[in-house]
Image (tube, helix red, strand yellow):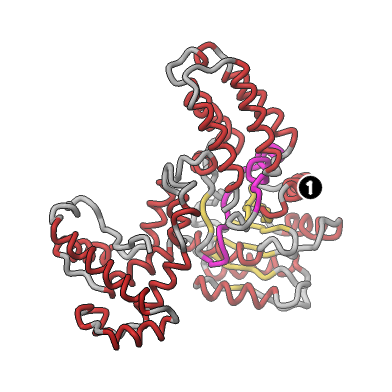
Amino acid sequence: MAFESLSDKLQNIFKNLRGKGRLSEADVKAALKEVKMALLEADVSFKVVKQFIKTVQERAIGQDVLNSLTPGQMVIKIVNEELVSLMGSETTEIALKPSNEITVIMMAGLQGAGKTTTTAKIAGKLKAKGRKPLLAACDVYRPAAIKQLQINGEKQGVPVFSMGEHHSPVNIAKAAVEHARKEGMNVVILDTAGRLHVDEEMMEELVAIKEAVEVSQTILVVDAMTGQDAVNVAGMFNEKIGIDGVILTKLDGDTRGGAALSIRSVTGKPILYIGMGEKLSDLEQFYPDRMASRILGMGDILSLIEKAELEVDQEKAKELSQKLRKAEFDFNDFLDQMQQVKKMGGMTSILGMMPGMGQLKDADVDEKAMDRVEAIILSMTEKERANPAILNPSRKQRIARGAGVDISEVNRIVKQFEQMKKMMKQLPGMMGGKKKGASAVWAA
């Protein structure tokens, strides 16, 4: 995930601060100098970093901090609060009109930022909130843009309005709003054309659309992997056409993430959502406080809970909890659990959201090892999964061949599974009745 390098550096800086019983003004200034370098390396705007460090330093060298019992923790608290402030303090929703009126949302951005996919993701979010969205294909220039929108719209169960490639985007936008009015839809999302770079022709087209239809929200989609370029693009779009918010895509990639820390400060516009993957469900609401927690290695339990509520089958979790209490679970249950963990982004993603676990995620979790475990279980028959006791040497040999692993790996998994069942029998009260469910995943 983005900020991984920044997060590691900041955690090391603060670890040194916490290790000191007392802090001098020089200690604080030295630590903040390192924080400044870490932020600049993460591609945060120089002006933003300069102001951020100045604000933190003014607060951190006050007598209340330096004379407190835990000065290191107080400095971290101040950095956390200022990071939240930098990213916007409050979560901002897409402003929608009452459901009996039509809200027109215009999506804008450069080519390659993931605008068309993000447009469909937003439609899915609004549909889940009870709205009736219509996607309008206004990109008549890029080959296959209309088809891409139609495919994604179908996956989200959202209709797409298209007039083909031979009408002007302005006329398509007007016709889409009229169509929505006739069909009783209350949100029209315009997927406009992108360009390889900001140019006057593109800006004029967007301005013309805004003049032709009453656009309630103009949302800019930017690629987080372009770093400061993303911030510059946001500034130019805001200056030329006026934007109401930003969606940052590809924040799950190998990116330094500085754009997320700079955009609000540079443009004055909030980050609404962040794209965390290719799937249409991989769009997260942007919470400045949760992002600050992730950056500082404090975890993000609230997002983890929300992810679990969305992805985990609660009935299956309840059923598994009962099986665990009675030590009656089998490899079918274990396979279900592994697949639920995958839906949540894998163990690496989960550990990254847990307080204090961020630095363990790479060292302790081998996602490929978990894939091998899954391959072994999938190579078993239904009967073998339900009753591991029948796994004799010849069956294990066949399973190993099917999974492409050595038979010793199959033996190890079966042995671990049996040991876990024995342990669960010895600890009947361990699973309590308060939890919604439990995971049977162990470190492979």
Q: Residue at x 17, y 65 (%)?
A: 327
Q: Is residue 214 visible?
A: no
Looking at the rendered structure, the secondary structure element under dot 1 is helix
Q: Where does residue 29 sit, x and y in percent of width and height?
A: 64, 22
Amino acid found under the numbered disc labelled 1: Met
**Residues packed near mark 1 inside 10 Å, few (<14), some (14 to 19) or many (20 plus):** some
Residue 89 in the figure: left or right of residue 224: left
Residue 284: tell me if it is visible.
Answer: yes
Q: Nearer the viewer, residue 300 or 246?
A: 300
How many numbered badges does the structure rendering display? 1
What residue is drawn where x is 78% and y is 72%? 141
In the rendered structure, the answer to whether residue 430 lies left or right of residue 46 reads left
- The residue at the point 35 percent across, 87 percent down is 398
Q: Residue 214 placed where, x, y %?
A: 67, 55
Q: Is residue 267 magenta?
A: yes
In depth, the one of 283 and 328 nearer the eye is: 328
85 shown above or below 366: above
The span shown in magenta is: 255-280
Residue 232 or residue 189, whichever sits in front: 232
Name the spot of residue 137 as percent of width and height, x first. Answer: 67, 70
Q: Is residue 402 above or below residue 74?
A: below
Residue 200 vertical position relative to residue 297 in the rendered view, above or below: below
Residue identifier under label 1: 236
